[in-house]
């Protein structure tokens, strides 16, 4: 099916009272999105569930009938934000470096940003990295390296949290992100991805399977492929409770090497042409080539809009 056809069908499915009843009455935790193909006519309805126990079989049969069998069903395993338990060597202050709220073990610095209202320069990562899952207060210290990587106050304070970050909430969530203003006098290159590579500020849109990369605190630089977009009713467990996301991106590894692991949360997802696509917020430990897991990301346009920032340059 073509992209717009799948999107229209997905909207019809989630508008059906049967869908809402299955989630509320039967406890089905099924996510639905658009599984991308390699050509414009190869898209399918994506259905994601943690296990067979989260599937409502009657609803799945109904979706398959509506989609003419064009359904991509995959199991993710547990979807939960887990604390980092290991320590990693620190790299310089840059995209992909270790950084976190003083009360969070560790995570990844996604990118450098400029606040639109006043031009303040700061960093962007996940809410659960920079704001400790809604617990962070305005001006809280952000450390580089993160606490799990031996970062300590006051010597390793690089930024202060801006307290108006989007809160994680049970329903209608699109982003897990926060912005922290950098302290003055730090040396960094806001767009550097490597010695000779520079991030572009134009945003890429995935309308077919798209090769992407990320630089993360734990697994470093890895490559993957965007397999699904527009993923709605995507339920993730945090310490603060279960959060249902919409509009999310799914990424798989190209081989048995994991695309991401705990501690990579907050990584910027970008194309092989260095255009930003998304902000990684979750790794699922099951599925993908060699059962190496999958990554899930907020669309980068939603992140920029939610925080009121642009890429720093």
Image (spheres, rainbow, N blue to C red):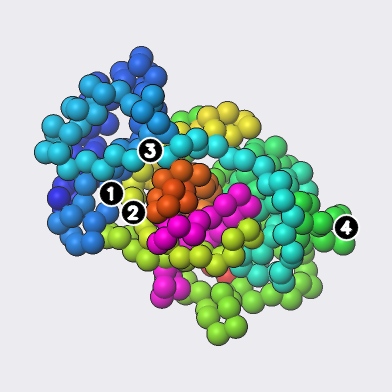
| Residue 3 lies in the magenta-colored region | no
Q: Secondary structure at mark 1?
A: strand
Residue 148 x %, y %: 76, 51
Q: Are marks 4 and 3 in contact (CB under 8 Å)?
A: no
Q: CA distance from mark 3 to mark 2?
A: 14 Å
Mark 4 — residue? 154
Q: Nearer the viewer, mark 4 or mark 1?
A: 1
Q: CA distance from mark 2 to mark 1?
A: 6 Å
Q: Are marks 2 and 1 in contact (CB under 8 Å)?
A: yes
Location of residue 205 by image quarter: bottom left
Mark 1 — residue? 35
Residue 130 x %, y %: 67, 49
Mark 2 — residue? 227
- Ranked by sequence position, the earlier of labels 4 and 3 is 3
On screen, residue 71 versus residue 116, left or right, reads left
Q: Residues within 10 Å of mark 4 (few under 14, many from 20)?
A: few
Residue 118 x %, y %: 63, 62
Most distant residue in the bottom direction:
196
Q: CA distance from mark 3 to mark 1?
A: 14 Å
Mark 3 — residue? 75
Q: Secondary structure at mark 3?
A: strand
On screen, residue 209 versus residue 153, left or right, reads left
Q: Nearer the viewer, mark 4 or mark 3?
A: 3
Q: Residues within 10 Å of mark 3 (few under 14, many from 20)?
A: some
Location of residue 135 by image quarter: top right
| Residue 252 lies in the magenta-colored region | yes
Residue 228 x %, y %: 33, 50
Q: Which residues are magenta?
A: 251-276
Q: CA distance from mark 2 to mark 4?
A: 42 Å
- Ranked by sequence position, the earlier of labels 2 and 1 is 1
């Amino acid at each position: 099916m073509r992209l717009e056809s799948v999107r229209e069908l997905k909207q019809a499915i989630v508008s059906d009272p049967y869908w809402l009843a299955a989630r509320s009455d039967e406890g089905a935790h099924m996510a639905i999105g658009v599984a991308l193909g390699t050509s414009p006519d190869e898209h399918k309805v994506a259905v994601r569930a943690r296990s067979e126990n989260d599937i409502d079989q009657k609803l799945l049969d109904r979706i398959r009938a509506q989609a003419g069998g064009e359904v991509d069903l995959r199991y993710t395993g547990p979807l939960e934000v887990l604390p980092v338990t290991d320590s990693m060597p620190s790299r310089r202050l840059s995209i992909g470096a270790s950084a976190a709220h003083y009360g969070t073990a560790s995570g990844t610095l996604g990118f450098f940003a400029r606040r639109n209202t006043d031009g303040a320069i700061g960093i962007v990562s996940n809410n659960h990295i920079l704001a400790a899952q809604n617990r962070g207060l305005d001006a809280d210290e952000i450390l580089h390296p993160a606490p799990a990587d031996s970062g300590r106050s006051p010597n390793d304070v690089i930024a202060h949290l801006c307290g108006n970050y989007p809160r994680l909430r049970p329903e209608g969530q699109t982003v897990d992100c926060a912005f922290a203003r950098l302290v003055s006098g730090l040396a960094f290159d806001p767009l550097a991805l490597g010695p000779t590579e520079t991030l572009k500020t134009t945003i890429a849109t995935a309308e077919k399977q798209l090769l992407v990369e990320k630089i993360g605190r734990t697994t470093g630089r890895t490559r993957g492929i965007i397999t699904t977009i527009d993923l709605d009713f995507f339920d993730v467990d945090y310490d603060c409770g279960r959060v249902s996301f919409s509009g999310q991106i799914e990424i798989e590894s190209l081989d048995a090497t994991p695309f991401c692991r705990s501690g990579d949360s907050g990584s910027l997802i970008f194309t092989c042409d260095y255009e930003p696509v998304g902000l990684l917020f979750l790794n699922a430990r099951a599925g993908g080539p060699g059962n190496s897991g999958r990554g899930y990301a907020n669309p980068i346009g939603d992140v920029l809009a939610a925080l009121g920032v642009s890429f720093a340059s």
